[in-house]
Amino acid sequence: MHVKSTIDGFEVLWNDQPILKHSSATPLIYVGYGEETIDMYRGNFDIRDYVIERTPLRYVEVEDNDGQITLSFKKSKEEETLLKFSLSMTDNELKLTTDFASDSINRFWLRVHADQNEKVYGCGEQLSHFNMRGKNFPLWTSEPGVGRNKNTYVTWQADVKDKAGGDYYHTNFPQPTYVSSEKYYCHIETTAYADFDFRNPTFHELHVWDVPAEIIFEGAPTFLELVEKITARFGRQPELPEWTYNGIWLGIQGGTEVVEKKIDKAIESGVKIGGVWCQDWQGKRITSFGKRLMWNWRWNPEEYPNLDTKIHEWKEKGIRFLGYINPYVAVEGDLFQHANEKGYLAKTVEGDTYLVDFGEFYCGVVDFTNPVAAGWYRSVIKENMIDFGIDGWMADFGEYLPTDVVLHNGVDAKIMHNAWPTMWAKVNYEAVEEAGKLGEVVYFMRAGYTGIQKYCTLLWGGDQSVDWTLDDGLASVIPAALSSGMVGCGLHHSDIGGYTSLHGNKRSKELLMRWAEMGAFTPVMRTHEGNRPYDCFQYDDDQESLDHLAKMTNIYVTLAPYTKSLVKENAEKGIPVQRPLFMHYEQDEASYHIQYEYLYGQDVLVAPVHQEGQTEWEVYLPEDVWVHLWSGEVYTGGTVSVDAPLGCPPVFYRKSSEWKSLFEQVSTIK
Amino acid sequence: MHVKSTIDGFEVLWNDQPILKHSSATPLIYVGYGEETIDMYRGNFDIRDYVIERTPLRYVEVEDNDGQITLSFKKSKEEETLLKFSLSMTDNELKLTTDFASDSINRFWLRVHADQNEKVYGCGEQLSHFNMRGKNFPLWTSEPGVGRNKNTYVTWQADVKDKAGGDYYHTNFPQPTYVSSEKYYCHIETTAYADFDFRNPTFHELHVWDVPAEIIFEGAPTFLELVEKITARFGRQPELPEWTYNGIWLGIQGGTEVVEKKIDKAIESGVKIGGVWCQDWQGKRITSFGKRLMWNWRWNPEEYPNLDTKIHEWKEKGIRFLGYINPYVAVEGDLFQHANEKGYLAKTVEGDTYLVDFGEFYCGVVDFTNPVAAGWYRSVIKENMIDFGIDGWMADFGEYLPTDVVLHNGVDAKIMHNAWPTMWAKVNYEAVEEAGKLGEVVYFMRAGYTGIQKYCTLLWGGDQSVDWTLDDGLASVIPAALSSGMVGCGLHHSDIGGYTSLHGNKRSKELLMRWAEMGAFTPVMRTHEGNRPYDCFQYDDDQESLDHLAKMTNIYVTLAPYTKSLVKENAEKGIPVQRPLFMHYEQDEASYHIQYEYLYGQDVLVAPVHQEGQTEWEVYLPEDVWVHLWSGEVYTGGTVSVDAPLGCPPVFYRKSSEWKSLFEQVSTIK
């Protein structure tokens, strides 16, 4: 990249295309001052800003001291410098580092040059829109919302009853990083509230409630090389443990006996099992929302008698035990008591222990900015989970840091809020690392932010509604996997069947089966009973469903050598397992707009059936020679319609693939 | 009022209290530049602003040339003047007139000093909040919304299906004028989009999408004198015609025979009738919304045979005929054809006739900025209505001026949009005036803006839902009457029974009866069949309801001498007929927060029952000696509970009133 001076400004060009442009008439940067109000209700945030001042910095001085370029921005020539960046540049990278920022600035807007036809992706895990052009995306980790579409009854009810309906941009995992179809990415190094606005035809306006420390642009000749660069910066996930490929992780609750029975029943039907995932290993409670957990992170022998021996018995059979933890401790438990005594919990302004309402129960927030508290929590994970024999867990939450909490490091909680998911991931990562179990133990998270790439071993798509809606049902998981993959989280999976059953929403057998079909073509298959198990059809509720799951897990296990190769590629290069079509077909303009299909590695194309009552499905295929998995029919691209009865998800493989014989083997599975 | 210089600014004081305060640290004015997007769908507007720049004008130069004070505002001392006001002042009035405004400014914010405990009222006709403190009020004439509360099912459905749900601030009649509990009013002379923000404890921020021509503050020692001053500025309504007091105006549709029968049936039951109001005198059409009208403003003899003779027969009996008109002409009619040929209709940017979608039919907009077109429309009113014998009408609409229409006067439609209701009122006023019928003919409007005070003979509260909701039902009419009364529209009434029956909402008998009880204590009683008459209980659907209406109309007629005295007071001094409690009890702090009761003149207090299934009602009484109308019991103030069965609305009169014997007479009506 290089800087070119213009009459009263400058341009930054990459491959002769402008990325940044400044003149007094079209200033690059606006700064100002705002007063925000932030209300949190159970992880749902009502965020408003009163922008008192917003001023363009029309005047710039460009200094070049032996190639060290600095940019000094002012309102006008006569006034003082308000903002100063120093630039470091290579052919493909530009980094702007803030040298100086006036104290009176707490709002920052940057306009990045945009082409009318440019598409943008990423910004963490986006569930409604893979290509974000045409909308703005507030970036603040939170509950993703129940329904996520103001036009649906579920969303309306969730809003009215719990302020929980959400909208298209709500996500557990935001990140101030986007990837342009122009083959560069832009990252803003900040954890403040941000809003990336892609509505304007000629610029992207990136807004931050702080002056960011760094702004980075980096380009590459291909998308594959670009994600490699992105993950070189943010980190990559280790490979998944070998045992994962033994089969599905069955989400089971209810105690040792129930687990035992469910394992036997599943095995009898031919279901391949890699693990059992028991959230309630540490006890449960019932609330009006549904079944909730005890939130005191140690084995509950009343709920799970003999688990200490059973866990090893099951391991012998190739079935690992997975648990659950999150970064909060319930007031009723001994962990809370200990942490409270030791001062490990976040405080109120008055100096009391801050209690967060999680819906009819209250918890303390383990203060990860206190190294001793983080160390203690790592020891909880190591001693109570890993040493006990637990080989994986849901590392839940991370989005609820209240903005009025007082933290050990003295930094404003509004700045720490977005940082929390990655801090929580790091606690898990380091606990596993210290136990010497990286690559053997796996935990999965829904919350994320910059840096989660390195510290989270596996994403899951969060709490979808048990329905067919585009914004919160089965379909929403696909853009979620694609967008998080673009920013370097290449391992994604979701609750098979979805999770949230509220306001009359009940999980149907068909939904569960379609979701399992998608799950077979993701790195990990895992079921969830849902928040209200009795309102949700379960995989073992009838034989047809068990047989269907057996087929899907057999596909997953048979496909494992291929999947493993993809997971390895992700660990080595950061190329995501689930990829947008344009990643391998960049000349194909249509492929940039496809968000409900994905390439599973380079050689498999998956188009999950995400509507009810379908027996055929329309699929867009980029130009190549594709074999339909079930019929063996060959297609060369374009929109095609294929038979898609239950049990035969629309999947295609490349005829020229070196894995062709494996795919043929998959196609014979009944 | 007077100006006092301070160290780096100035203050404007009234009664030693600051109204305006400026210093470089707390600037009075912010200016900037914004780009709005405005979408209209059937009178519902989606309005968004992108504020590109907002800058405080920290530096001011105060010049005093022989008492002629000018204020020149700049961003900083070194920069050029961006805004200049000249001041004219008397003891109780301050007027800031814009002398100069930079071309680059299209957004303006003024901060008026506020006391923490100050209350504010007015801003036109506000249906949800009489005291507006704590909220902001966008001021843009539009449909008021169906439901007007995002938590209700009706609102949600209206939003989803028709973008029509609305919110607390949506109103047909906004006005950039507020009245402070500090006994001054502030008016901004503009027709641009505005947003008055009363959320801040120390200032009111008044925002206009233009630099306003004038800003006026005027104070008075009492609220009564204050409304006198307000109406001296904006105008006052003439008295209502004498025939109004003959009884109710029955809203009837369906043709001459139906009207005849309904008159007879009502009279038989003892209902006192002042008029029949037949919207469909010019024909009707059926749409999915319900019954709609033909919108070609002339007698439809198929629908109303012999109306030309009947109208006079009925007049003989003391029953006047009222019709309907609005400022649009339907494409199918001859009026459209004539106006289109003559060039009287507003145009598109391309120069074609602009057609507005009114819900399954299309209309032209008569361009009132063209004096010839306005004159023609006056002649339509005179010839087709007044000359035909029509003595009153609903002058509907006025809020739908699209912002992309091209007008004869060349002014941007975004600036003309808010001006339209008053222009429409003026066409009616001048038509009646030219016919020599002021005080004999009456028309009623829902739309309004600055100046409507003079040109509209009677307000009606718009299209309430046929329900008990606070934001869109019976109750909402009370703050509507009080707020419009505060800005000088002292004659208010509403559709008895409400109007909008959508999304499962159906009018109950009880609602209709309670609404009639309120109507008896307003200047005019008028029923409406509703948009879907068959989903609405009608006053003549059973004998109990007819008897109840007979009682209420007898109350209205008996009370007429008192009501007439109030209407006269309004015509002479602008003191509204329906008044907030604090207007006569300014020492009573609680009275400033009461919005569901009103004083009917000084001597009667009305607390309409606005909830379903009530037989008792709690009423707040300011300190005085009050007689309960029905029991004769005497109360001296505070919160009291009285019996309030159907037929006995909670009404009190002052024991010391000179009208006492009249009220006693009313109390005997069965």
Image (cartoon, coloured by chain):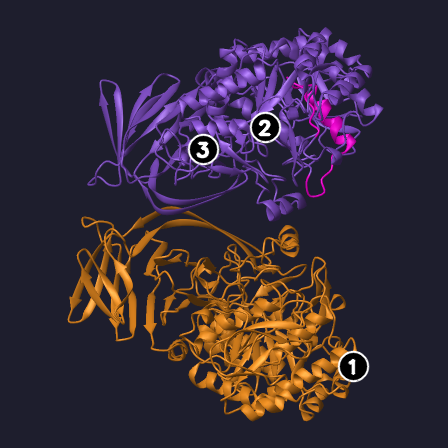
Chain colours: A purple, B orange
Is residue A505 on the magenta stretch? yes
Numbered badge on residue B257: 1
Q: Main secondary structure of the magenta part?
A: loop
Q: Position of residue A323 (x, y in %)?
A: 62, 21
Q: Residue A322, position in %: x, y?
A: 64, 18
Q: For the residue marked with disc 2, what is the amino acid?
A: Ala
Residue A221 horizontal side relative to residue A209, left or right = right
Residue wearing tag 3 = A417
Residues under labels 1 and 3: Cα distance?
72 Å
- Comparing A37 with B84, the one in front is A37
> For the residue marked with disc 3, what is the amino acid?
His
On what subunit does the disc labeled 3 rest? Answer: A
Drawn side of residue A114 relative to residue A298, left or right: left
> Does the image show residue B24?
yes
Q: Are marks 2 and 3 on the same chain?
A: yes
> Left or right: where does residue A655 sit relative to residue A353?
right
Amino acid identity at mark 1? Glu
Chain part drawn in magenta: A502-529
Residue sitting at x 61%, y 72%: B617
Vertical comparison of B255 with A282: above or below: below
Residue found at the very far right of the displayed protein: A543
Distance (Cα) linking label 2 and label 3? 21 Å
Task: Find numbered disc 1 in the image and state the secondary structure of the residue it sits on.
Answer: helix
What residue sits right under mark 2 in the picture? A480
Label 3 neighbour load within 10 Å: few <14, some 14-19, many 20+: many
B219 is higher (above) or lower (below) than A138:
below
State whether residue B243 appears in this view. no
